[in-house]
Image (tube, rainbow, N blue to C red):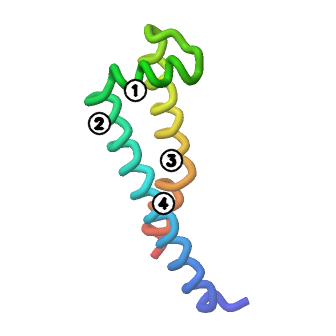
Amino acid sequence: MNLLNLLPIRENMQAFFGWASLLCIAYLILATLFLIILRRPVGRLHSKLFGVQIESLPMEYFRFMANFKIASIILFIIPYLSLKFLS
């Protein structure tokens, strides 16, 4: 297989990972702002929906955001950066 034939595939993959990274970062920023600004209404809603104590919700939010950030870095940002450096 000729390596020149793989160039469009790499460009498409780089574009995919770039947009996915951007969407993940935007979601993290939006979710963080949403939780900061609307902490009490969101806390009451999640407490009623999931049966979780309001006192434990900040730790659950923090755990979710941390896990989402780690997954975003591993699944999207690192592949994007590695493809960017290869080109």
Which of pointers 2 and 3 lies earlier in the amino acid sequence? 2
Q: As shown in the figure, which amino acid type bears the numbered disc 4? A: Ala
Residue on which disc 4 sits: 20
Residue on which disc 2 sits: 33
Residue 66 pos. (x, y %): 47, 31
Residue on which disc 3 sits: 72
Asked if labels 1 and 4 touch by Cβ distance under 8 angstroms, the answer is no
Which of pointers 3 and 4 lies earlier in the amino acid sequence? 4
Single out the residue that lies furthest toward the right.
Answer: 1
| SS of the residue under disc 4 | helix
Q: CA distance from mark 3 to mark 4?
A: 9 Å
**79 sits to left or right of 55:** right
Q: Nearer the viewer, mark 2 or mark 1?
A: 1
Which of pointers 2 and 1 lies earlier in the amino acid sequence? 2
Residue on which disc 1 sits: 42
Question: Could you tell me which residue is drawn at 49 percent across and 47 percent down?
Answer: 73
Q: CA distance from mark 3 to mark 1?
A: 24 Å
Q: As shown in the figure, which amino acid type bears the numbered disc 2? A: Leu
Residue 21 pos. (x, y %): 44, 57
- Please determine whether, in this image, residue 15 is positioned above or below residue 8: above
Q: CA distance from mark 2 to mark 4?
A: 20 Å
Q: Nearer the viewer, mark 3 or mark 1?
A: 1
Question: Could you tell me which residue is drawn at 26 percent across and 30 percent down?
Answer: 37
Q: As shown in the figure, which amino acid type bears the numbered disc 3? A: Ser
Which of pointers 3 and 1 lies earlier in the amino acid sequence? 1
